[in-house]
Amino acid sequence: MAKVSWKPGTMVYPAPAALVTCGAEPQEWNMLTVAWTGTVCTNPPMCYISVRPERHSHAIIERQMEFTLNLTTEAMARATDWAGVRSGADHDKFRHTGLTPLPGLKVRSPLIEQSPLSIECRVAGISRLGSHDMFLADVINVVADDRYIDPATGYFDLAAARLLAYSHGHYHALGPILGHFGFSVKKP
Amino acid sequence: MAKVSWKPGTMVYPAPAALVTCGAEPQEWNMLTVAWTGTVCTNPPMCYISVRPERHSHAIIERQMEFTLNLTTEAMARATDWAGVRSGADHDKFRHTGLTPLPGLKVRSPLIEQSPLSIECRVAGISRLGSHDMFLADVINVVADDRYIDPATGYFDLAAARLLAYSHGHYHALGPILGHFGFSVKKP
């Protein structure tokens, strides 16, 4: 076994495979797939997406200064890939994928009905980094699908939604839970 | 089925469960676990980590302006959790977890021998966002463990490393591959 030095690259994995929706009006509603996304601050809750300037959604988000991050599931794998490969300049991605837009609650971008969780965001700043612009955003609202909420306890079972992950060119299902945060210091 | 509006929160999942190593000298080498990390630009390759200012590693990284992101595996789940819960102010985390530091190749922070892939980073900027500071960083080097490299093809099989994911308070194994990037538009 040895350690091999490569050239610099983008290897922070696994990443989400999220569907970003945008558009202030239904006629410009669009979606694109991003893996370059994550949480950047807990309080206030903030996240980011990085998008190539040449993507059709980029100009929409920059004009609207809002977007919605929709988490994706195993059942949405094909649609998620397709929305990342094709352009909203050429296709109505909702019609083609069969994913259903619902009006946003706190922003004008739509929610995706099939997504277990949608994160409504307002852009706080844009950093021009090179191939990608990073949109730093405040989380304005989180919209959950109540099919994953236990009516007795209120617990949201995100694991039951079977989220999709993206890692090194592959879409993965999430596998079994190996432990919860803090399990290594819990008394038996 | 209905959509339920929650208060804003940090729900971008799945996230990596990465071990960040830092320290310019072996006597201050430390590690901490971060899920708030990801790629922010492909070219030049850039990533970020968000760290609470009160974490022991925060001051080390801010002084050193370098860190290394070590991807973690199922076999490292307990060590990964422990390094996120405990503080380097009170513990030698390498000694306690049994993870092995190796000298960095392009930065002074150590690599973790057990990690399949380590990403050596130089901090390009720090944003004070609230509970967390976001360290934006240039990827200086990627160090791969050759046990995952096919000697015939040179292909690095990251899936074989069985990466760990973090989602909504749980550590997950990565499950099976559902498709590769672009599979939805490939001719059968």
Image: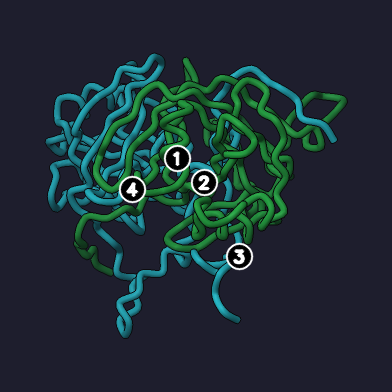
Chain colours: A green, B cyan
Q: CA distance from mark 4 to mark 1?
A: 18 Å
In the image, is residue B133 above or below residue B172?
above
The quadrant where residue A160 appears? top right
Asked if disc 3 and disc 2 are in contact, CB closer than 8 Å, the reply is no
In the image, is residue B163 above or below residue B122?
below
The chain letter under disc 2 is A
Q: Which label lies toward us, 4 or 3?
A: 3
Q: Which label lies toward us, 2 or 4?
A: 2
**Numbered circle sitting on residue B178:** 3
Most foreground residue, B12 or A90: A90
**Numbered circle sitting on residue B70:** 4
Q: Amino acid at mark 1?
A: Thr
Query: What is the residue that sits farthest to the bottom in this orientation?
Result: B152
Asked if disc 2 and disc 1 are in contact, CB closer than 8 Å, the reply is yes
Q: Residue at x 42, y 51 (%)?
A: A13
Q: CA distance from mark 3 to mark 2?
A: 14 Å
